[in-house]
Image: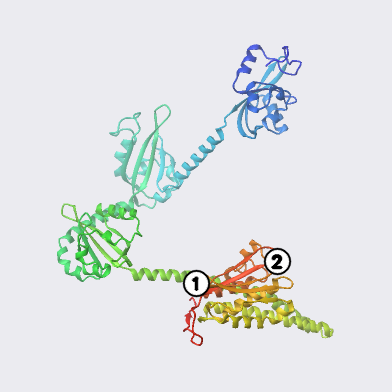
Amino acid sequence: MRDEPHNPGVGASGEADLPDMAEAAFESNSAVMLLVDPGPGTIIHANEAASNYSGRSRHEMRGMPTHEFVGMAPEELASLLAEVMAGRRTSFEYEHRLPDGELRRATVLCAPVRSGQRVLVSLVLMDCPERPRIEAALRASEERFRLLVETSTDVIWTVDEAMRFTYVSPAVMRLRGLTPEEAMRESLEEAVCPEFLPPVADSLHGRSEHGDRGETSHVGRWEIQQPHKDGSRVWVELITRELYDENGRRSGVLGISRDITRRKNAERQLLDYQGRLEAQNRELRRFKVAFEQSGNTIVITDPEGTILYANPRFEATTGYTLEEAKGQNPRILKSGELDDAAYRALWETISSGRIWRGEFHNRRKDGSLYWEAATIAPVVDEEGRITNYIAIKEDITVRKEAQESLRKYAVELESQNAELDAFAHTVAHDLKGPVGALVGFSELLADSPEMREEERSGMLNHINQTGWQMTRIIDALLLLSATRRKKVEIAPLDMGRIIAGVRHRLDNMVQQHGADIVEPESWPRALGYGPWVEEVWVNYLSNAVKYGGRPPRIELGAEATAEGTVRFWVRDNGAGLSPAEQSRLFLPFTRLHQVSVEGHGLGLSIVCRIVERLGGETGVESGVGEGSLFFFTLPQAAEVIPGLPPGPDRLDAVP
């Protein structure tokens, strides 16, 4: 450690001199130790452990600002050193990053020390790399325990040796109608109905058969009644365990109070029912005729579940005769849709003497599925032994199908309501601009009688264009509405004739943009509704003309697919679409108001609706700078003899 001869105080190198014994302890200590000059705040001495810890040589650390070693702001460290010198600080914690990048947290013990005529500060760093993880794990464990206690439906409580509550969990509000604060003002004796108090009190006071205080903690369990705030009583399962301090002396009791009122009521009802069932069992044979004529399926099995009897309704429902079913287990009806855990719960219920009620989705002999609502009850003799099980089952297939239809109808109705809201929004949004323009120009014409003829003519031209814009919007919305409600006939399409009509409608636009359109000599046969398919082509082709290259070069095409459909497309030579723009195309109508790509919003929503109604799908293939290919598919039509088209199918609107 020594590089120069020692003198009292600080050596010529600025390093503090230490007595030989102190120096030996300083050097051999495994803890990181520093001597710091509190004035400039620099390190004047460091042991080997500090060098190993920091990755710096002792020579490098000598004269190094201490705040750099610990990774603190200079003013923060200066304040700490001043507090140490004044005797107000003996330790601090800090988090710093070692030269190798590792983030460490350490505790530093501080003390002023005299070296010769000077007073320095000794820093001893106590490093625990695992400490953050341990502290985090401890906090997480404590938080999980707190949540478990505070969210438990059971009341968790503790009492001291005087049987006064020291903690009561929030569940006491549900159990007894008291807040935890109100409950803690009681003693345990006040919280138990008097007739149940003696055995509980004796045990909790250490006078029970379990032994005296100081012995190994035992668990107590009772079923008692506790008073409710409203004056009623609640049945509670009380579970207790003694608590002991670090010296082995009992310090109190931990308890759990669980509401068993419903169970006790159910047990009482079950006892009443079992009494009635015993009387009914003696009359069971008298009801055989009623069984035979019952509209419900009735099955009787032995205690192992083997079928002994089934009434005629069983055969009508399942397709199995009594002869086929007799000796079999009801599992022959299993469809596999009810898991094994549910069957285990069923058997646990009925084998314990209780009644099970539920539903089965079973399979008939012919493989078809049906729903049954079942009640299965044990039959017991005078001694309470289970002799049989009887199942009464009702075919509820029609009811379940009606419920499913009602559910689907509710979903469809909700979707339609959302679409109506979106429809109203779109009408208001798309017509607001043109209507405003019409009103504005008409007011200018009315208020400016001396307007020049060319200005008047320009405004009239704007009014005319705006009117046509409104007409196109209204036509699009009417078409969208028609695709939702109109009943159309699906038939083979003459696609060449449809394309000719589309090109005639767009002739002015095509000539204005100088577009070159190429189409195949023949088209594959497909099924659809001509007027709607024409609107699809008009939308695709007009977008290709408007957003294609300059001049537009457009290719129309089609091909049959292996899936039994025909894929039609329009390819342009435009700027193309980014993936983000493609993702915003073909939005459902209910989302049109959220975002749109210029020129593609309402039109492509209508295209998507039309094609889906006709049993196809839409899509786009594009890349920036590569043009775009918009496609749609339709069901493929079988070849037909000219002049003898097949009869059309009817495509009804979704209600």
The one nearer the camera, 638 or 43, is 638
Mark 2, residue position: 575
Q: CA distance from mark 2 to mark 1?
A: 33 Å
Q: Which mark is residue 564?
A: 1
Three-letter code for the amino acid on which mark 2 is drawn: Ala
Q: Is residue 475 above or below residue 567?
A: below
Q: Position of residue 297 (x, y in %)?
A: 25, 67
Callout 1: SS: loop
Within 10 Å of the Cα at label 1, are there few (<14), some (14-19), or many (20+) other Cα atoms? some
The one nearer the camera, 261 or 637, is 637
Residue at (64, 21) in percent of width and height: 48
Q: Position of 246 compared to 591: left or right?
A: left
User: In which quadrant of the rendered view does residue 332 lie?
Assistant: bottom left
First reached walking from the N terminus: tag 2 or tag 1? 1
Three-letter code for the amino acid on which mark 1 is drawn: Gly
Q: Position of residue 156 (x, y in %)?
A: 41, 43
Residue at (15, 54) in percent of width and height: 382
User: In which quadrant of the rendered view does residue 579 lie?
Assistant: bottom right
The colouring scheme, among rainbow, by chain, secondary structure or one colour, is: rainbow
Q: Position of residue 639 (x, y in %)?
A: 49, 80
